[in-house]
């Protein structure tokens, strides 16, 4: 199946293609730190915006951007780069699905630890 074939929706597509773009040990370790940072900063930003604490919320948005940038640097270590984004909505959707759904699923399924050990499914 072509990596750009998104049949089944974004979550299913991202899961099908995830393992091939997450094999570098450097990238795996970067993700293990950057994804929780992104998630924590997202929740903190929401909480701070609700409390009308706009400056600290802005700082959280910067932390989210840094966490994402670190993941991008990690992806440069991969043999197979991610499929290019189709536009701004695709960018946002894919980033948030990866952070909140796909990477946690990859860790909980054992994929992260298998890949860190150099054991690949395909």
Image (spheres, grey):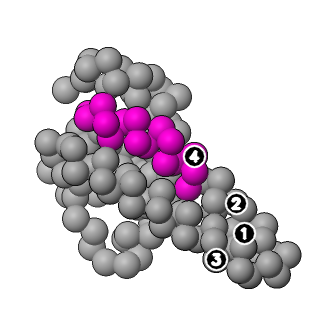
Q: Quadrant of residue 23?
A: top left
Q: Residue at x 22, y 65 (%)?
A: 84
* Label 4 with label 3: CB-CB less than 8 Å: no
User: CB atoms at circles 3 and 2 under 8 Å apart?
Assistant: no
Depth order, front residue of 1/110: 110
Disc 4 residue crowd, few under 14, some 14–19, many 20+, Cα 10 Å: some
Badge number at residue 43? 2
110 lies left or right of 5: right
Indicate which label's residue lies in the foreground, 3 or 2: 3
- Residue 6 on the magenta segment: no
Q: Is residue 30 magenta?
A: yes
Q: Identify the residue position indicated by label 4 in the image.
A: 36
Which badge, 4 or 2, comes first in the chain's sequence? Answer: 4
Is residue 101 shown to the viewer in this render? no
What is the spatial separation of the Cα atoms under label 1 and label 3, in whole angstroms?
10 Å
In the rendered view, tell whether residue 32 sits above or below residue 38: above
The CA span between labels 1 and 4 is 15 Å
Mark 1 and 2 residues: CB-CB less than 8 Å, in contact?
yes
- Distance from Cα at disc 3 to Cα at disc 2: 12 Å
Kindly state the secondary structure of the residue where label 2 is placed. helix
Structural distance between the alpha carbons of marks 4 and 2: 11 Å
Where residue 51 sits in the image (x, y, percent)? 85, 75
Give the spatial CA distance, label 4 vs label 3. Answer: 18 Å
Residue 73: horizontal and vertical position, in percent? 30, 53
The residue wearing badge 3 is: 58
Residue in front for this viewpoint, 112 or 25: 25
**Which region of the structure is painted magenta?**
23-38
Nearest to viewer (mark 4 / mark 3) = 3
> Which quarter shows the N terminus?
top left
Judging by the rendered image, the residue that carries numbered circle 1 is 46
């Amino acid at each position: 199946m072509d990596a750009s074939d998104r049949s089944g929706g974004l979550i299913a597509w991202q899961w099908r293609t995830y393992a091939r773009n997450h094999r570098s040990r450097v990238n795996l370790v970067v993700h293990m730190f950057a994804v929780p940072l992104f998630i924590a900063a997202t929740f903190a930003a929401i909480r701070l915006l609700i409390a009308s604490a706009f400056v600290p919320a802005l700082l959280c948005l910067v932390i989210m951007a840094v966490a994402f940038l670190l993941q991008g640097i990690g992806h440069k270590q991969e043999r197979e780069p991610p499929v290019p984004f189709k536009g701004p909505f695709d960018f946002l959707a894919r980033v948030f699905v990866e952070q909140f759904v796909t990477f946690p699923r990859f860790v909980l399924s054992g994929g992260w630890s298998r890949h860190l050990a150099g054991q690949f499914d395909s």
